[in-house]
Image: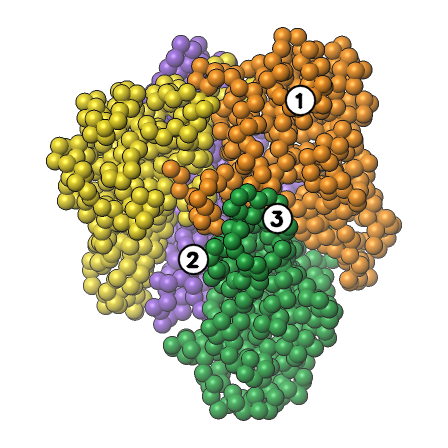
Chain colours: A orange, B yellow, C purple, D green
């Protein structure tokens, strides 16, 4: 009964599940790897979300994502008086839409418990209905048996940690000991948890970031600073389901939300240098040298703590060219902190500029 | 599991169904009547829509509407392998959200048949499940028994009329004869059907306009010209469910979409004069008189076919002030056609300006 | 040689100096007074500005202002090797454009000295060339002789007060004693000086706010928070040059920039109450009462420090409707600080809401 | 007296003439050539423009241009009662700003006569004051002596050709015969003249496009379709004044305005193929093949007149990815007209897509 707006699609007799204009998210690859943009935490009407599963594929397509996972709650299904519980429904319904939209669909589910241990996504599973068990350790065991990547979700969520600070309990240490924990969310919805950086570095876990969206992406991220939903950037050998899985278990990730990047320095540093290039000086007068820095990414970079007489602050505008007027007495390379690339609980990336 | 963005709502213990900033749609009342903004044609996951019913209330609240009706298809329920058919589900689920959002909720359903007779909304009904019958005339009879306002939907929809031209068949004449037809959609989704103006004037029916939305309002109306979804403006004695119903049966409506208004001249003319006021001349030189016209509505008006030496064209900007530089030889009143106020199949509103 | 875009203007044989769409700045009048929006500090190519005088009139027209003054520097004319010094040139050139645009043109000039005493605008003067004298006290005397309103400009400008704090020197006390000082800028360009509130209240001076624009208004105020340039709101008995002058000498002003209003409480309080209205409750459940507050102005209001269980914070969106969900145990009236209405050096407006 | 907004510039002791964020205009180079973005037609207060010359450099910097020319009228200087006539003033004043902004500054002037011959820009000249002569042929001769590139400006300007159609008179044939005409404006301000394509192809002249701006660029091009001012794209061997001049005389240009490109097919065709790439099919079902086309430029391309069962129309969104769902019965390559690449008076570019 639906009339479609998009002209290229009006030729269809079959059902078109994906529509809208795909955004070209402008982020570089790393040498040897392709950067896959992923949201591993999404809900639908099959738990407490407000949309039919195909909406998640259409949103991901429009937002320029490469991979998504629907992770409806196993233990929380408030629509059940109208919709019978079916933990694999969203996965089944999305198959065709994902293929039409060239999206990698990761089978997932959210294990939804009080703290401890809290909420966890089991990703790359095979049958979500088998995760509906009483004992949470039995659930983890079943997920692992299915080959799951286990992600600890929003560890500082105030409904479970009123002070907003993530805490590791016995059960979390036990999961790590078993090799049953593989990543933790640094970004969730519109929040972030600095301490997650420390946990991930200490226990060698992947840093992840996801939207945890229950409603409509475009209506929840409306303020001008929300240029993009939270996403996990995964550095995969190829653009495929299996390469994505390999990269996740290997922990090759950064996370991206608003103007912020976060993750381990080993990925953050080469990523920054892939984004920018410094031009040769084009003019000088008796006191200054003039040159330009080009930023080829969607992320503006805020450089701080420069040493006088170099500018103490510079903003390298997204997809833009920034003119630098440098006092000739400044020494090269110019050293800066990148305020919006977080590499630790209390640490940002240090970079150097020279021409 | 949802974390709410809006600060004033974080104090809640109960479930908040309505959120977001309400838009103040700037349209005047008519003398003696309040202008109610309504969308009487909306779908949810309970037929072939892609959202949970509360999304429709949140959207209506944000868009500044006064009244909505969920009109899921009776005869078309493609989600039934996952969601058991329940024609009253959306109505039940929306009760609390509508009250929280100060929205008038009209109980409705869409009778969904091949052409003839096509699709019809039964509005102001009591039990949609009783409309699930084989014979379409039995369905109409049951709806009328429940006190329904019957609206003929998208009569020129190309899936049913490939040339886009509405046609009246025997069954439509029969409905009119019985007093079983009360309105016809002029605007539906992103289409309009000029001939509807002729039908409505000839058979004394209400002109209506609705979104027929299956997806997300904000994502379907994204182009800059879509300042608003199609809506029916109803001139009611009070802002209440019963006054709305009285006004609909009395046919006191205009329809509004993008920059367009349409409807009967008896409502369109006073509506235009409520929107604008003409200021006294503030300056003149040897050849020209200078004055301003203020338009206090969200609708820009395009005035055409002025008589030289008056300007042949003027745009009265929405919520703006337009300066007119008038040749002193022009005669008052200035007479114009308002290009974007449609009062007939091939006719626009004629107005006069004087100071 | 110029081709005009605006269609209504293409009929002209004479030169059209004002063009573009006038913005309807949505701010209320005060009972008994009309609110005039004014910018009393503007530069052109005749001192160190970068535009021809008519650009200032076109900008003011587009921005919805009622009055402007060009206040080119008397003592600083860096373009003089190309443009002969002529302190009245901008005033002469603007006469016709101001009349065409229904703008009140105030004859002005900027007395431009080192601190003390700093920079001052002489407004409502008759001949700027007579202000070109060696002794600054002679200049003030001449301005006063011409009937000038003397405004102290940007008293905390860092080029003259490196710590940004305004200071009164002997000469300022002398001016006040003589009755030769009538107002001080609280807003200038993109700065504000809290201490000005104290000076104005103590010495009974008008609070003013202006752009001090040298370049192009629309290009200097581009960030989303710059919804408007700094302006002085003057509460005049009529919309005329003489009423404006009377109101300025009487000190009936507020100043407006971005989301901020500032000025004396006697004007700020009634202004706030003219902007908003509180609706009757439309719904209640066992714990909450629901009602709406309408803000009919372009200024959003940020209400802080509410007493629990009332919401501690509310934003009353500009030209919008804000839904309040009030705990039934809260007591009326609700008392709030309006964070963005500044009434003193360290003081904001206190208001009450009740239905 | 100006306070600067941009933080990196506040360290300056010297005058900063260029400020604002430079836009990265995303257009490809051609193999062997660099694409220089140029506006060769601009006015200032030194003829009938409304801005000081440095404004033109700041605008060009912000707009991402590589080269500009100030071309004030020789014969029309309406500000002369305030500003003494000086045809080289803008050129002198702009030297430093151009160097600071890495802009190539082309010395120019506009020969301003009634039709015939109309208006002409002399570009790459040495002394504009020598062009102030009675006989227009003497002026051309002097310009040529200085090495000028002569551009015929807005040949269909309605003030000189009321029907908007360019006409060649005896004097134009004479100029061509002498080798004294090198290019013609296809775009000027907000107009275009289709017939210019025929003239340029027939007489082997460069197609040019410029803003002819008298006012403020950002305020004249405000409608959403004005993503950029009219500009001449010049394919130069290097980014230098001399390479630019060589390329102009060689006629290696396209012109760009809004969504439109125009010029000779020999440049338009490789330019299009540098903008887009066609991906390998990623999915197929029984009836369709799915693939994506990436457009790496700021120009959306509108492909028309496809042969069924291929889509008849496609829009390749600017900086975006377009999904094509292709009927398997369609034959490769797909052939389309690019509606917005104009290669003749009545002709658009034909292109082929294949994977």
Q: Secondary structure at mark 2?
A: loop
Q: Position of residue D20 (x, y in %)?
A: 64, 53
**Residue denoted by label 1:** A122
Residue at the image point whose x is 47% and y is 55% from the top: D309
Q: Is residue D294 left or right of residue C29?
A: right
Q: Nearer the viewer, mark 1 or mark 2?
A: 1
Q: Is residue B303 above or below residue A336?
A: below
Taking the spot 41% from the left edge, 45% from the top edge, the residue there is: B226
Please report the residue visible at 69 percent of the width from the left and 41 percent of the height from the top. A239
Q: Nearer the viewer, residue A168 or C145?
A: A168
The residue mark sitting in front, 1 or 3, is 3
Could you tell whether D272 is left or right of D163 in the image? right
Q: Residue at label 3?
A: D281
Please give the residue where the numbered disc 2 appears in the rendered image: C20
Quick check: A209 left or right of B125?
right
Q: Is residue C29 visible?
A: no
């Amino acid at each position: 009964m639906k009339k479609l707006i998009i002209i290229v699609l009006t030729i269809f007799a079959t059902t078109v599940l994906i529509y809208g204009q795909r955004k070209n998210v402008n982020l570089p690859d790393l040498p040897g790897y392709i950067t896959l943009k992923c949201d591993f935490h999404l809900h639908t009407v099959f738990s407490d979300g407000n949309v039919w599963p195909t909406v998640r594929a259409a949103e991901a397509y429009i937002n320029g994502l490469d991979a998504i996972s629907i992770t409806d709650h196993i233990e929380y299904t408030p629509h059940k008086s109208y919709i019978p519980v079916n933990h694999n429904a969203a996965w089944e319904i999305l198959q065709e839409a994902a293929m039409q939209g060239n999206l990698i669909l990761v089978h997932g589910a959210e294990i939804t418990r009080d703290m401890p241990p809290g909420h966890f996504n089991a990703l790359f599973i095979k049958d979500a209905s088998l995760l509906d068990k009483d004992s949470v350790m039995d659930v983890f065991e079943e997920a692992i048996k299915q080959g799951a990547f286990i992600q600890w979700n929003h560890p500082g969520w105030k409904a479970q940690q009123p002070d907003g600070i993530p805490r590791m309990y016995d059960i979390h240490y036990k999961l790590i000991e078993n090799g049953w924990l593989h990543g933790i969310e640094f970004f969730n919805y519109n929040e972030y948890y600095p301490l997650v950086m420390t946990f991930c570095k200490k226990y060698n876990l992947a840093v992840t970031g996801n939207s945890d969206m229950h409603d409509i992406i475009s209506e929840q991220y409306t303020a001008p600073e929300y240029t993009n939903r939270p996403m996990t950037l995964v550095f995969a050998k190829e653009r495929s389901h299996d390469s994505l899985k390999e990269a996740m278990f290997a922990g090759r990730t950064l996370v991206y939300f608003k103007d912020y990047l976060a993750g381990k320095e080993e990925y953050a540093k080469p990523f920054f240098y892939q984004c920018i290039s410094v031009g040769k000086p084009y003019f000088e007068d008796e006191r200054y040298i003039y040159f330009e820095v080009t930023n080829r990414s969607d992320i503006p970079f805020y450089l701080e703590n420069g040493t006088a007489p170099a500018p103490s602050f510079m903003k390298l505008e997204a997809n833009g060219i920034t003119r630098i007027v440098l006092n000739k007495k400044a020494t090269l390379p110019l050293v800066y902190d990148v305020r919006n690339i977080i590499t630790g609980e209390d640490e940002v990336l240090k970079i150097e500029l020279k021409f």
